[in-house]
Image (cartoon, rainbow, N blue to C red):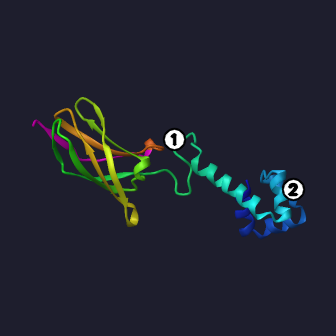
Amino acid sequence: MLIYFIADYLRNPELQLRASEDPAQVLAEYGITLDIQHALRRHDHAAILKSAHDELTALFTRPQDHDYVVAAWGPIDIEVTSVSPPTAKVNTPMRLTVVGRTFPPKGKARLAFRNEQSNQRVEGTIVSITTGPYAQSTLLGQVTLPTVGLWKVTVASVDQPAGAGEWNGDLHVTAG
């Protein structure tokens, strides 16, 4: 890949020497296509940048076998540290605040609720998500829970559900 070659070339004097002696061999070792090899020789910056951009895009968006997207910072590890208010009334719309770390952006996040006794699941609506320093996140959401009982609250990434964060506490839903 071109991006690997560039990164190695900039840091490795031995590779710089080898590339100056036999550029075609070194570029072939990195799997660089003939088109990009020609672009490098022509100093065609537009073609080189487009190829590097395409490679980076593929790395950041291609799902892998381990159920997360490869990215420079690894899989998302969402934490839910608090939910307020901690109580709600059955079949009554409620607004809630969920606080934690590393919540994904609103369009990529999912707010879910699971009844501990029946395992019934309900999706909530995300109104907004803000993330501050050190990945501290606040989610404002809405939900109507249909059953009395103890509910777990989960925030997940739509793209990486394996990294979901579940609140250790319980949302208590009581009769009207």
- Alpha-carbon distance for marks 1 and 2? 35 Å
Secondary structure type for disc 1: loop
The residue carrying mark 1 is 67
Percent of width and height locating residue 71? 56, 53
Three-letter residue code for mark 2: Gln
Residue drawn at (10%, 35%), measured in percent from left and top? 175
Residue drawn at (86%, 63%), measured in percent from left and top? 41
Residue bounds of the magenta highlight = 163-176
Q: Is residue 155 left or right of residue 171?
A: right
The residue carrying mark 2 is 25
Percent of width and height locating residue 26? 83, 58
Mark 1 or 2, nearer chain start: 2
Of residue 128 and residue 7, the one placed in the foreground of this image is: 128
Residue lying farthest to the right in this orientation? 21
Q: Are marks 1 and 2 in contact (CB under 8 Å)?
A: no
Three-letter residue code for mark 1: Asp
